[in-house]
Amino acid sequence: MRKAAAPRVVNVSSGYGQLAGMSANVPSYCLSKLALNGVTIMLAAALRDDGVAVNSMCPGWVRTDMGGPDATRSVDEGADTAVWLADEAPHELTGKFFRSRAEIVWQIAPIARAISTSCKASLTG
């Protein structure tokens, strides 16, 4: 992979893999996608000097066996961002999370603030 002209890794994740997007209804799915997003960030940092772009993407709710017939996106719409990241996106984009070709902010700060506030309260209370 390192010998390719513009090597890329595209991980198929989910909005449920964001710290602020996890659901108690599907904990194993959320945690697996959270781990995948963490691997994306770590690989992007580890492979940056080798010129390998590593990103995650969320296809959205797609009409597949898993998504069901009521899902809001077609298979083509769900695959569009993955194909774009694999072939057309600026190679400098790495360590990011996307949906509909737009970056999704990792949303770590709100959770970090909540944890910090909780820790301060337990230390002072």
Image (cartoon, rainbow, N blue to C red):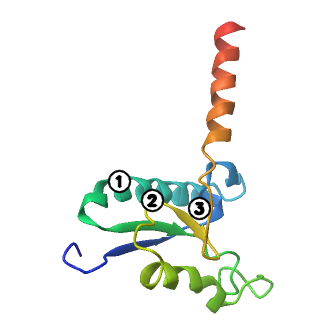
Label 1 crowd (10 A; few <14 / some 14-19 / many >=20): some
Disc 1 and disc 2 in contact, CB within 8 angstroms = yes
Residue ID for mark 3: 29
Q: Nearer the viewer, mark 2 or mark 3?
A: 2
Q: x, y (%) of residue 32?
A: 52, 59
In the displayed structure, 60 sits above or below 46; it is below
Q: Inspect the image, locate mark 1, and give the three-letter code of the amino acid beneath it.
A: Ala
Disc 2 and disc 3 in contact, CB within 8 angstroms = no
Q: Residue furthest right?
A: 70
Give the quadrant of residue 115.
top right
Residue ID for mark 1: 45
Q: Earlier in the sequence, mark 2 or mark 3?
A: 3
Q: Inspect the image, locate mark 2, and give the three-letter code of the amino acid beneath it.
A: Gly
Q: Inspect the image, locate mark 3, and give the three-letter code of the amino acid beneath it.
A: Tyr
Q: How many angstroms separate mark 1 from mark 2 (CA)?
A: 7 Å
Q: Report whether 53 appears left or right of 113.
A: left
- Observer-nearest residue: 110 or 60? 110
In the displayed structure, 116 sits above or below 75; it is above
Residue ID for mark 2: 95
Q: Residue at x 59, y 58 (%)?
A: 17
Q: Secondary structure at mark 2?
A: loop
